[in-house]
Amino acid sequence: MKKYVAYYRVSTKRQNEGLSLDDQQQQVRAFVASKSGELVGEYTEVESARKGTRIAIHQAIEACKESGRDCTLIISKMDRLTRDASFWYVLKSEGVKVLSLDNNSENELMTGMLVLIADIEGKRIRDRVINITKYRMNRGDIIGNPNKLNEYRSKAIEKAREKKNALAAFRNHKAIMDIGALRNDANYTFAKIAEHLNRSKTTTSRGNKWSAKQVQVIYLRHCSSSSNS
């Protein structure tokens, strides 16, 4: 039975309350059912497609990889996954299969072209917003509600802090699991584990590369009561 991990994304809370998320879920679930497949996981994100700010997409990718080589990451439309072509190439380098229902032929060349188109359109959208904002500012218009600036700023800071903590916890959990598993193999020293983590782009909780000392600290703190180095 073919396995799938679903990823859904809407850009704002208002969209999350509407039909957009429901439409994505219905399309994906109907497709999986039509293929007599198994939906082993579903991940939802209320966030823009900005690179490096999303958590659920990384969780979906890891779930897909843990479910085996035959598992596919499924999305309703390519721009729900990313508008960044470089992110697509990272996925392919890690061996993650992606199926977008706006290209259900599972042709990787066609999927790659859709990503490039989404990337170009994303840049056009950003350029239009920047140009309109500059025009209004030059005209003397007030951008936004001045009375709400402090409230928005406070909420934005709190949201950023929560997201940063959640992403750090996710990275830390994944690293602990990997380090514990690799140390079961006597051939893996702390230095070799650090090399492995860096090659697989598994970062520290702060998003940095690993050193042998950092691996040892995590291992002794979470995986063992004594050093095996």
Image (cartoon, rainbow, N blue to C red):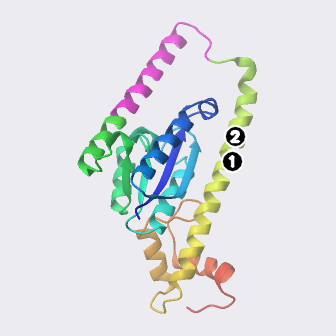
Question: Which residue is depicted at the point 47% across and 22% down?
Answer: 129
Q: Is residue 196 magenta?
A: no
Q: Magenta stretch?
A: 120-143
Q: Is residue 127 magenta?
A: yes
Query: Disc 1 marks which amino acid?
Result: Arg
Q: Main secondary structure of the magenta part?
A: helix
Q: Verify CB contact (< 8 Å) between mark 2 and mark 1.
A: yes
Q: Is residue 51 left or right of residue 147?
A: left
User: From where the camera sits, is residue 49 visible?
Assistant: no
Task: Tell me where residue 2 appears, x and y as whole percent.
Answer: 40, 62
Quarter of the figure that contains the C terminus? bottom right
Q: Is residue 115 left or right of residue 21?
A: left
Question: Which residue is depicted at the point 45% across and 69% down?
Answer: 198
Q: Secondary structure at mark 1?
A: helix
User: From where the camera sits, is residue 97 visible?
Assistant: yes
In the image, residue 26 sits, relative to residue 107, either above or below, namely: above
Residue that mark 1 sits on: 161
Query: Disc 2 marks which amino acid?
Result: Ile
The quarter holding residue 156 reads top right
The quarter holding residue 110 reads top left
Residue furthest left in the image: 109
Task: Tell me where residue 207 appears, x and y as whole percent.
Answer: 54, 59
In the image, residue 174 sits, relative to residue 21, either above or below, namely: below
Question: Which residue is depicted at the point 48% across and 89% down?
Answer: 185
Q: Secondary structure at mark 2?
A: helix
Label placed on residue 157: 2
In the image, residue 48 sits, relative to residue 168, either above or below, namely: above
Quarter of the figure that contains the N terminus? bottom left
Looking at this view, is 198 or 104 the one in front?
104
Real-space Cα separation, disc 2 to disc 1, in angstroms = 6 Å
Q: Is residue 13 left or right of residue 114?
A: right
